[in-house]
């Protein structure tokens, strides 16, 4: 297999194609790279969530001629069968549904359906973050609203969504208003910024355009989740001075007051490019933070995992899989921790799983699924009988795979 430096151009081109956004004007050649799977032939980005009764729901993109819609499907038998797709947009509009940008689906405390997505605009790399909701169990959905107050034709994309214990909805996204303002002043500005908005009324309205941080990476998804103590936490790829693409962590508050983000990875990856590889984040009941991310360390690169107990520094990162690993997911259920990632061998793509049943003291690894065709990123959900993998592929459709390794290693 070619080495990292040899694959630099291939990696940048494939990463741009995989994310569906292409190389940005400000993106330059990556000094490192790794073999990536061929570009996807369809937009397979699919949101998945499990409701209080254990049913699995998905939201995905449907194309009808030149019209684009969001469609909702349901499985009551753990993915063995699915309902017919139901359109949940009354009028068609552009929808981003691949790579780092795909629809999001969450359930509110009273069974509300909340869906966010990025709507590409006519200008390249521009977009709006959109939101719809259902208050009647998915029977009907509201007309889309734009979450952010800023309506400039710039990047508002790569949305992420979470709900706090009070039922407030948080939507975060990558935003380039500060970059455009700096350019107008003929000042330098690296990357983009992370912004968010909050709804206190079950998605009827949003307030905010609260800035979390300047200088985020331009096209890496944000990991957004709620910790056991009710804090909404964001993890994203940040651009540290001078151009180090490690990760930062911050708490989002309903008032918009955000403390200075803290550094969450320390790989010192100097790269003048966006790798289209966002992180994964989950919390255990005791507050331990579990995170996974893609990075390059010297001549080595791939996906890494580490955890941090409350008040403690991040533990030593552990590499997951081979150099071809990418796009990890994490789920925690009691003392069970599950990690999943894609891994390409030159011919087929597998979802690899690493499982601990004792809060990370010991681990077992296995292949959970594979495909010879294009595929979405893996998602891990807490189901009725434990953690399940939800994975959409071009050949097999949406697959639900229980993570049923032996409970004791």
Image (cartoon, rainbow, N blue to C red):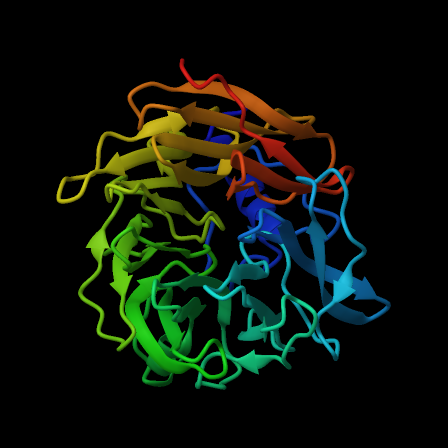
Q: Is residue 65 left or right of residue 365?
A: right
Q: Percent from the top left, x then y, of residue 106?
A: 52, 60
What residue is shown at x 46% (from left), y 55% (from top)?
A: 221
**Quarter the N terminus occupies:** top right
The quarter of the displayed image where residue 72 is located: bottom right
Question: Residue furthest toward the top?
Answer: 409
Residue in the foreground of this view, choosing between 382 and 330: 382
Residue 11 drawn above or below residue 143: above
What residue is shown at x 20% (from left), y 54% (from top)?
A: 262
Question: Residue furthest toward the right?
Answer: 65
Q: Is residue 304 left or right of residue 346?
A: left
The quarter of the displayed image where residue 391 is located: top right
**Quarter the C terminus occupies:** top left
Residue 161 appears in the figure:
yes
The quarter of the displayed image where residue 298 is located: top left
Q: Percent from the top left, x then y, of residue 192?
A: 38, 67
Residue 188 appears in the figure:
no
**How many numbered marks have been drawn onto this rendered protein structure?**
0
Residue 320 drawn above or below residue 257: above
Question: Residue furthest toward the left?
Answer: 311
Residue in the foreground of this view, choosing between 130 and 98: 130
Q: Percent from the top left, x then y, of residue 260?
A: 18, 64
Residue 295 drawn above or below residue 167: above
What residue is shown at x 54% (from left), y 64% (from top)?
A: 111
Q: Is residue 245 left or right of residue 339?
A: left
């Amino acid at each position: 297999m070619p080495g990292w430096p040899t694959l630099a151009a291939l990696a940048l081109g494939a990463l741009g194609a995989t994310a569906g956004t292409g190389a940005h004007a400000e993106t330059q050649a990556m000094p490192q790279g790794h073999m990536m799977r061929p570009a996807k032939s369809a937009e397979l980005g699919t949101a998945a969530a499990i409701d209080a009764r254990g049913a699995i729901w998905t939201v995905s993109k449907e194309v009808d001629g030149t019209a684009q819609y969001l469609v909702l499907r349901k499985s009551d038998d753990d993915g063995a069968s699915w309902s017919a797709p139901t359109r949940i947009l009354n009028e068609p509009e552009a929808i981003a549904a691949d790579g780092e940008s795909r629809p999001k689906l969450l359930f509110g405390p009273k069974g509300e359906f909340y869906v966010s997505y990025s709507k590409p605009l006519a200008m390249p790399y521009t977009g709006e973050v959109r939101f719809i909701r259902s208050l009647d169990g998915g029977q009907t959905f509201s007309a889309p609203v734009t979450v952010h107050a800023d309506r400039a034709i710039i990047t508002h994309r790569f949305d992420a969504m979470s709900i706090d214990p009070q039922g407030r909805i948080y939507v975060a996204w990558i935003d380039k208003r500060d970059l455009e303002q700096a350019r107008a002043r003929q000042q330098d500005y690296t990357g983009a910024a992370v912004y968010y908005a909050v709804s206190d009324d079950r998605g009827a309205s949003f307030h905010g355009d609260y800035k979390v941080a300047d200088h985020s990476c331009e096209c890496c998804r944000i990991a957004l989740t709620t910790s056991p103590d009710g804090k909404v936490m964001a993890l994203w790829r940040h651009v540290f001075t001078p151009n180090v693409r490690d990760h930062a962590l911050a708490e989002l508050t309903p008032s918009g007051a955000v403390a200075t983000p803290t550094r969450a990875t320390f790989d010192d990856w100097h790269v003048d490019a966006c790798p289209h590889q966002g992180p994964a984040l989950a919390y255990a009941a005791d507050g331990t933070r579990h995170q996974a991310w893609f990075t390059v360390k010297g001549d080595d690169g791939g996906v890494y995992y580490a955890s941090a107990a409350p008040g403690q520094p991040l533990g030593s990162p552990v590499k997951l899989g081979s150099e071809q690993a990418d796009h990890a997911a994490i789920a925690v259920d009691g003392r069970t921790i599950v990690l999943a990632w894609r891994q390409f061998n030159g011919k087929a793509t597998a979802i690899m799983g690493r499982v601990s049943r004792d809060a990370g003291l010991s681990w077992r690894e296995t292949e959970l699924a594979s495909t010879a065709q294009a595929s979405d990123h893996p998602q891990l959900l807490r189901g009725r009988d434990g953690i399940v993998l939800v994975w959409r592929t071009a050949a097999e459709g949406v697959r639900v795979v229980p993570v049923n390794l032996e409970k004791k290693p």
